[in-house]
Amino acid sequence: EGSRIKGVYTLYLQILSKRVNFMQEQIPMLQQRVLAEDKANTVKVQEYLDKWEQEKPLRGDFTPSSAMEILQKYEFTLKKSSLDYENLTAAKDALELTETATSPDNYNIILNDALEELTD
């Protein structure tokens, strides 16, 4: 009975070792993917913020319904971008990435400020 338990335990350790090795091989690829997504997300958000600056319904030439439509569109987009940023931050933490692709340190503040402007 004791040798049987020892054999099962040894098999378990072998399986665990193979899985750990596989995961270690995958980490650099995952790190590169997360950094690429971080860079793409930063560019995309900057484009949205630039478009928002141009399309703000501040002038009187917008109907109330078109102004609301614009606000809703950008609010949805920026909320999604904020969630993407949070997910990327969590992924970078999990993968122990200290570098960021191009995201400035105040990236989350910029997104939150834009969202706050939209919801006011």
Image: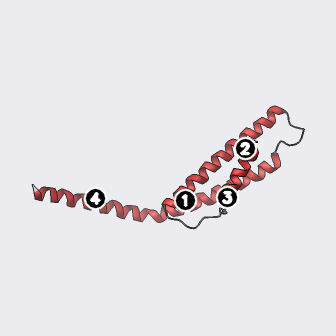
Q: CA distance from mark 4 to mark 2?
A: 49 Å
Measured Cα–Cα span from mark 1 to mark 4: 28 Å
Q: Nearer the viewer, mark 1 or mark 3?
A: 3
Q: Amino acid at mark 4?
A: Ile
> Pointer 4: what residue?
15
- Mark found first going from the N terminus, 1 or 4: 4
Q: Nearer the viewer, residue 65 or 114?
A: 114
Nearer the N terminus, badge 1 or badge 2?
1
Distance of label 4 from label 3 (alpha carbons)? 42 Å
Residue behind mark 2: 74
Left or right position of 27 against 8? right
Alpha carbon distance from label 1 to label 2: 25 Å
The earlier-in-sequence mark between 4 and 2 is 4
Local packing at callout 4 (Cα closer than 10 Å; few below 14, some 14-19, many 20+) is few
Q: Residue at x 73, y 50 (%)?
A: 114
Label disc, if present, on residue 34 of the rendered structure: 1
Q: Which residue is mark 3?
A: 107
Count the labels in the image.
4
Among the two numbered marks 4 and 3 on one chain, the one whose residue lies closer to the N terminus: 4
- How far apart are the alpha carbons under marks 2 and 3? 17 Å
Residue 90: % across, % down: 53, 56
